[in-house]
Amino acid sequence: MLAGLLLCAGVSMAAEQANPAVEAHGASDANVPGWTISTTAPTGWTKDCCTYASAIGVNYVLYQGEWTGKPNRVMVLNVWPSKLPTLDAELQDDRKHYLQLDPAGKVASLPVNNPHMPCRGVLYSGSDHTDDAIVFCDPGKVAGIRYSWSVAIGATDPMRQQLLKLFKEVAEHSSYATFVPPSHSTGKPAAH
């Protein structure tokens, strides 16, 4: 019996890891409806909404191998209520903040093409020899939110180009939908 349960649990865990679908949910709040951000995780990457993501105060993380607690090679989803008037204003505000923290840092555009909504990418090259790629997306005024995917990659990481390619795919495949909890739920959002 125990062997059967362990086998069933192993199959379930393997199926979850083989399923590349990512869904992060947020409950409605004041004038912001509940939201779902969906995308596809790179093959072999671990998806986490509720353990490590929650511990570091973000909505979702994707990572390879074991969790180290370090930001290098971790894709991070952040969702926040829109406050600035435009997506470009969000990008300018982030750029200003980054250069205040690292005046020697370099800023370059990171081209992205998300067919679902306007998104803008930026690549920061820090004096710490770490590149931070960030893609900001705006699902529209009705959504009441904006979100970003980000990843930190060592400037000399031999996998840098491949990691940037995978990161861009995650950002470009991301989409927004209104989240309505199932009628039998407690109203608390869950993520997969």
Image: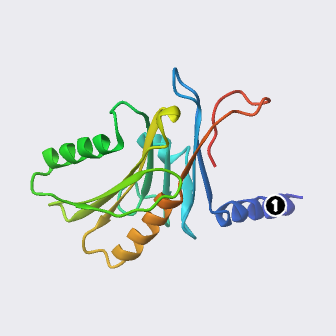
At horizontal 54% and vertical 67% (from top left) the residue drawn is 42
Rendered position, 118 above or below 185: below
Nearer the observer, 92 or 149: 92
| Amino acid beneath label 1 | Cys
For residue 123, what is the image quadrant?
bottom left
Nearer the observer, 2 or 70: 70
* Number of numbered labels in the structure image: 1
Q: At which x and y percent is residue 171?
A: 46, 58
Nearer the observer, 117 or 57: 117
Q: At which x and y percent is residue 168?
A: 43, 64
Q: At which x and y percent is residue 7?
A: 80, 64
- Left or right: where does residue 43 sit relative to residue 10? left
Rendered position, 77 above or below 41: above
Secondary structure beneath label 1: helix
Label 1 crowding class (10 Å Cα cut-off): few <14, some 14-19, many 20+? few
At horizontal 46% and vertical 69% (from top left) the residue drawn is 166
What is the residue that sits farthest to the right in this orientation? 1
Residue that numbered label 1 is attached to: 8
What scheme was used to colour the molecule?
Answer: rainbow
At horizontal 56% and vertical 43% (from top left) the residue drawn is 50
Q: Quadrant of the N terminus?
A: bottom right
